[in-house]
């Protein structure tokens, strides 16, 4: 029987690469997102809404009977310091980036506890390890996910459930390009120059690829990673080692 994986935010970028990678490894993959995708088994779900997440996952568990892997990937970026982050914006970012993961983990735990196995991967960021300017709320949420991985790992190790956080650096995805486009619109900078500067900032001299993050996620949910839990896995071209 194929293993079952749930990916939130699996329609674009890193999430889509994860769905494709797990499908190639013969997982049955469910994608919870608001943007439709024909890759994997799509379920429309606003991940910022706790009850929607719980309902979607309950339906999956009822239909297929188990969940072997949860990859909580849905999230969005925000460039702003604390003075320029209003309460409504903070609430929206927290709802998607943090509460969505909280809801998804809560929803899969009963099944994973019953089967006494399971792997949770939370998509954090290099900003769980370092700070970056103009990134107050995003940094806050990604640190919360890193903490969630560690506490979940400790609380559910007795059930054979593992939890880890992946901490990507600068990965070339639609999210990356949206952030660069917004910066260029504000500043008048040339996009090609900014992208080149971003690549040059990485010790390996290039941007990361979504497929590389997906490969790490696939390893973490595999039996080969059976002794890895509570970890923060950097995949940043050496950026945070500086």
Image (cartoon, helix red, strand yellow):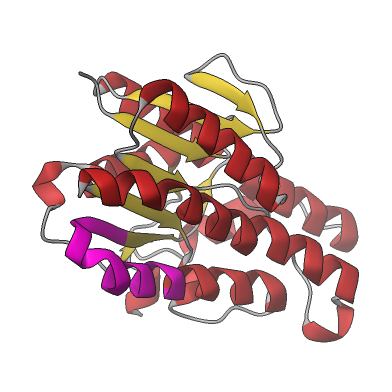
Q: Nearer the viewer, residue 77 or 118?
A: 118
On the rendered structure, is 79 left or right of 4? right
Residue 181 seen in the figure = yes
Along the viewing direction, whichever of 170 and 113 lies nearer the viewer: 113
> Which residues fall within the magenta stretch?
147-163
Q: Main secondary structure of the magenta part?
A: helix
Coordinates of residue 14 in the picture (x, y in percent): 49, 40
Q: Quadrant of residue 227?
A: bottom left
Residue 141 on image: x %, y %:
61, 70
- Is 29 situated above or below 67? above
Residue drawn at the location 29% of the way across and 38% of the way down: 68
Q: Is residue 10 left or right of residue 209?
A: right
Indicate yes or no whether the magenta region holds residue 151: yes
Residue positioned 68% across, 55% down in the render:
96
If the image is split into quadrants, where does the N terminus sit? top left
Q: Which residue is pictured at 79% across the width and 84% down the height?
A: 82
- Which image quadrant: the C terminus? bottom left
The answer, for residue 212, to whether it is visible in the render is: no
Q: Residue 97: name its quadrant.
A: bottom right
> What is the x, y in percent for residue 41?
50, 19
Residue drawn at x 79%, y 71% is: 90
Above or below, comparing residue 160 to residue 140 in the picture: above
- Return the x and y of residue 174 as percentages of the image width and height: 64, 39
Q: Nearer the viewer, residue 157 or 69?
A: 157
Left-right relation of 173 to 80? left
**Could you tell me how many numbered marks the image carries?**
0
148 drawn magenta = yes
Farthest bottom residue?
83
């Amino acid at each position: 029987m194929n293993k079952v994986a749930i990916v939130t935010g699996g329609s674009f970028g890193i999430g889509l690469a994860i769905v494709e990678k797990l499908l190639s490894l013969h997982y049955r993959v469910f994608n919870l997102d608001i943007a439709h995708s024909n890759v994997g088994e799509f379920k429309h779900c606003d991940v910022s809404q706790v009850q929607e997440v719980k309902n979607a996952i309950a339906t999956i568990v009822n239909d297929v009977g188990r969940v072997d892997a949860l990859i909580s990937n849905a999230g969005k970026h925000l460039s702003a310091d604390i003075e320029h982050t209003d309460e409504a914006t903070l609430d929206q970012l927290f709802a998607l980036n943090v509460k969505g993961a909280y809801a998804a983990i809560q929803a899969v735990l009963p099944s994973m506890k019953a089967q006494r196995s399971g792997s949770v991967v939370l998509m954090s960021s290099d900003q769980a390890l370092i700070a970056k300017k103009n990134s107050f709320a995003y940094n806050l949420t990604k640190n919360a996910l890193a903490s969630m991985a560690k506490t979940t790992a400790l609380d559910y190790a007795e059930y054979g459930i593992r939890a880890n956080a992946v901490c990507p650096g600068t990965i070339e995805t639609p999210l990356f390009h949206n952030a660069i486009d917004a910066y260029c619109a504000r500043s008048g900078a040339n996009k090609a120059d900014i992208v080149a500067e971003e690549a040059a900032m990485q010790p390996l001299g290039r941007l990361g690829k979504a497929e590389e993050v997906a490969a790490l996620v696939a390893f973490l949910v595999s039996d080969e990673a059976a002794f890895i839990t509570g970890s923060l896995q950097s995949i940043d071209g050496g950026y945070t080692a500086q």
